[in-house]
Image (cartoon, grey):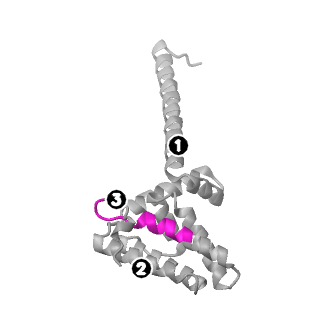
């Protein structure tokens, strides 16, 4: 039979205590990380958890998005570029009454052009939405809603009110992305007629 000395018992106690402290620290870190991601991503956090069916997988996905977007060269617009995009949007809205379905398609294209100009990659829609969610989580749901209505519009199964909502949704993202080098979102004063 092996007997343990007092030093052995102390060493075992220290190791157990260190393991308990490490586990408590890890739990604290995970809770803090979860809270940070929930705060940053808002409803996109909940949507991702629901889509992946697991909080850990969703949080890993959201962290991966952050890392991926951090590597992108997202640039602000020049004042002239912002003014052009603003004019293009104004022209687009003016055509809605005559061609609501066409305007929704054009709005989607203008938003993609703006995203490209800012430096977002133009992969598939879900990839674009995921990238947008990192810096603009409050409007990514607008982007998804606009895209869903646009798809229904392509098959003529969206009514005019839905198409109007799609344009409003695209506009929310458009406004969020429309910022110049000073970091201030562009206002209507930049519109050149």
Residue 53, quarter of the rendered image: bottom right
| In this picture, residue 148 sits left or right of residue 143 | right
Find residue 186 and report its horizontal and vertical position in percent. 37, 65
Name the residue: 59% across, 18% down. Answer: 1
Quadrant in which the C terminus appears: bottom left
Q: Which residues are magenta?
A: 168-182
Find residue 125 and report its horizontal and vertical position in percent. 53, 73
Which of these two is toward me, 193 or 24? 193
Q: CA gap, disc 3 to disc 2?
A: 20 Å
Which of the numbered marks, if any, corresponds to residue 184? 3
Q: CA gap, disc 1 to disc 3?
A: 28 Å
Which of the numbered marks, if any, corresponds to residue 125? none
Task: Return the disc, 1 or 3, that comes first in the chain's sequence.
Answer: 1
Give neighbour class at mark 1: few <14, some 14-19, many 20+ (Cα, 10 Å): few
Residue under label 1 = 35
Task: Return the disc, 3 or 2, that comes first in the chain's sequence.
Answer: 2
Asked if the residues shown at circle 1 and circle 2 are in contact, with their CB atoms under 8 angstroms apart, the answer is no
Residue under label 2 = 88
Residue 89, quarter of the rendered image: bottom left
Which of these two is toward me, 56 or 110? 110
């Amino acid at each position: 039979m092996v007997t343990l000395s007092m030093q052995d018992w102390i060493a075992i106690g220290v190791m157990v205590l260190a393991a308990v402290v490490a586990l408590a620290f890890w739990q604290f870190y995970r809770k803090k990380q979860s809270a940070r991601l929930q705060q940053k991503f808002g409803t996109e956090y909940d949507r991702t958890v629901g889509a992946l069916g697991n909080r850990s997988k969703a949080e890993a996905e959201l962290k991966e998005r952050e890392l991926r977007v951090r590597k992108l060269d997202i640039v602000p617009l020049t004042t002239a570029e912002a003014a052009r995009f603003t004019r293009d949007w104004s022209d687009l809205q003016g055509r809605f009454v005559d061609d609501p379905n066409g305007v929704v398609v054009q709005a989607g294209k203008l938003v993609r052009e703006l995203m490209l100009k800012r430096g977002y990659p133009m992969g598939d829609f879900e990839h674009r939405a995921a990238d947008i969610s990192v810096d603009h989580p409050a409007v990514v749901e607008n982007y998804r809603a606009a895209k869903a209505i646009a798809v229904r519009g392509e098959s003529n199964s969206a009514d005019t009110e839905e198409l109007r909502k799609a344009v409003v949704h695209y506009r929310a993202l458009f406004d969020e992305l429309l910022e110049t080098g000073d970091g201030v979102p562009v206002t209507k004063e930049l519109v050149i007629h």
